[in-house]
Amino acid sequence: MAFVKRAAFFALTATLLSCASAPAQSPSDVAARIGDRAITVKELDDQWRKGDPAGQAETVQKLYDSRRNALEEIVADMLIAEAAKTRGLSPQAFIQSEITRRVKPVTDTEVTAFYQANITQMQGQSLEAMAPAITRYLTENQDDEARLALIRELRRNGPALRMMFEVPRFEVKLSDADPSIGDPKAPITLIEFSDFQCPYCRQVSPTLKKLRAAYGDKLRIVWKHFPLTQIHPQAFKAGEAGQCAQDQGKFWEYHDQLFGNQQALQLDDLRRYAAASGLDVERFNACVDGSKHAEMVKTTLSEGLQLGVNSTPTVFVNGRRVAGAQPYDVFTAVIDEELSRKK
């Protein structure tokens, strides 16, 4: 209980220091005094990190994300208002006209395809019963995507934006045993905390491959095991198996086998995918059966928790956290920002 109260105190203190209306404080600034003793912001942050590293990471990231989202909203409103004024329209009328121009009505084929792809979530309801709700959902998605596309277009043609507040970065420890692809000296290192049984991790996998193809030698991708065992009971052993494949230099081939067969990750399945990946099956089986890499999977899971990771996939791009199966454009925006800093 004392630890919980102490961690909550540090979290509250840091939040108040960060969010107060006073000017932002540097690590060397004095945050408090007790008698003749001055306590700096850095001391507070160091103590907070020591007592509650995951809580600190989460709070720092949330503060940045909230500020960044607010900034994006202000910039979008400004650009839309300016474009609407040029067209002699109100901002609302301008947005509606642009959305109408950019989207097409949802078709019956699209509704059917969505229903079939998500049939396990339909709770036994028929296509006819679910069609109106699916149509609304797909229409709203199209509208949202059209608005985002409009804002991106206005941003490209608008004035340059320079952010004056620092992006939080987290130090992620790497080891030679971590599966990776790409030049270790690449200017961009993307570290993915992932789970072989997680559908969102499977969803983001093609995006990461696309990034690798687009950025080539500029990008290195590193995998970190983060099995969410409470909801994915096969994930931990699958992580061990992936590391056994890494021993034979075939991690990424095996990685693709697991994501391609995510509904079948029992031990016999893991052995079967080893053969399909071109592994020495006898060596692989001995590795998996002996739980050779169980401790490593536990270690990377602990590393993620210390960084505030609580879901998969969670990605760190040069230490910048990107949570969830984000679309390609989100990753390219972060990578391009990082590359521009290197110039």
Image (tube, rainbow, N blue to C red):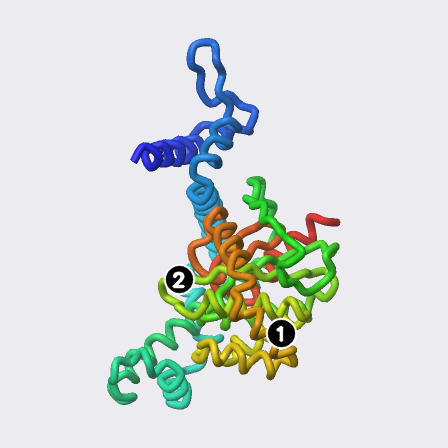
Mark 2 element type: helix
Residue at the top extreme of this rendering: 36
Q: Is residue 325 left or right of residue 248?
A: left
Return the x and y of residue 63 as percentages of the image width and height: 45, 43
- For label 1, the residue is 283
Labels in figure, total: 2
Of residues 262 and 191, the one drawn nearer to the viewer in this rendering:
262
Return the x and y of residue 277 as percentages of the image width and height: 62, 80
The amino acid on which the numbered mark 1 sits, given as a three-letter code, is: Arg
Residue shown at 45% from the left, 44% from the top: 54
Of residues 174 and 318, the one drawn nearer to the viewer in this rendering:
174
Mark 1 element type: helix
| Dot 2 or dot 1, earlier in sequence | 2
Viewport quadrant of the N terminus: top left
Mark 1 Cα-neighbour bin, 10 Å: few <14, some 14–19, many ≥20: few
The numbered dot on residue 84 is: none
- For label 2, the residue is 92
The answer to whether the residues at label 2 and label 1 have Cβ atoms under 8 Å apart is no
Is any part of residue 49 visible from this angle?
yes
Give the foreground label among 2 and 1. 1
The amino acid on which the numbered mark 2 sits, given as a three-letter code, is: Gln
Return the x and y of residue 194 as percentages of the image width and height: 51, 63
Q: Is residue 318 left or right of residue 302?
A: right
Residue shown at 60% from the left, 58% from the top: 333
The vertical placement of 274 against 305, above or below, is below
> Image quarter for residue 138?
bottom left
Is any part of residue 206 visible from this angle?
no
Residue shown at 65% from the left, 81% from the top: 278
Residue shown at 43% from the left, 39% from the top: 52
